[in-house]
Amino acid sequence: MNGAEGDKTLPIANVGRIMKQSLPPNAKISKESKQLMQECATEFISFVTGEASDKCHKENRKTVSGDDICWALCSLGFDNYAEAIGRYLYKYRQAELVKLNQNKLETAKDKV
């Protein structure tokens, strides 16, 4: 991939790091393997995001949410991924609420 398409790919160094986590420490990964995995991951993300985007378009919405991504994963038959991402999304939202509440407390203390 090059040109405009290259701008939409995951960074090859990140792909390589993720791949290395699943292999023995002494294993080597060829550049060709990293590039193939990069293309596959990018295509998968585009596929799921496109499905979520279509749903938003039909509902006259412009913003794709995490819930839309979970819906798209289920719609495409990736239920296990949807469950895992749904759990992560829930934990992320809870952490954001905690941060928001902490910021409110700090702001209130500053005003006193």
Image (cartoon, grey):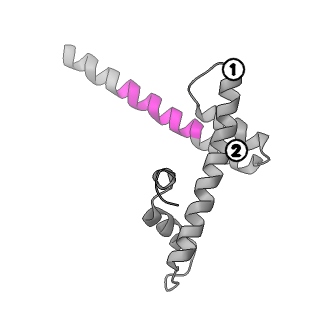
Instruction: Decide: few, some or many residues near mark 2? Use Cα within 10 Å; few <14, some 14-19, many ≥20.
Output: many
Give the amino acid type for the residue marked by disc 2 in the picture.
Ala
Instruction: Return the residue at label 2.
Output: 82
Residue corresponding to mark 1:
59
**Nearest-to-viewer mark from 2 and 1:** 1
Please indicate, yes or no, whether residue 112 appears anywhere in the rendered image. no
| Nearer to us in this view, 39 or 103 | 39
The residue segment tinted magenta is: 89-102
Q: Residue at x 47, y 68 (%)?
A: 17
The answer to which quarter of the image holds residue 22 is bottom right
- Is residue 29 toward the left or the right of residue 107 in the image? right
The x, y position of residue 16, in whole percent, is 49, 69
Using the image as rendered, state which of residue 26 and residue 90 is in the foreground. Answer: 26
- Against 29, residue 80 (above or below) is above
On-image quarter of the C terminus: top left
Q: Is residue 72 visible?
A: yes
Instruction: Look at 52% across and 80% down and name the residue there.
Output: 30
| Residue 101 lies in the magenta stretch | yes
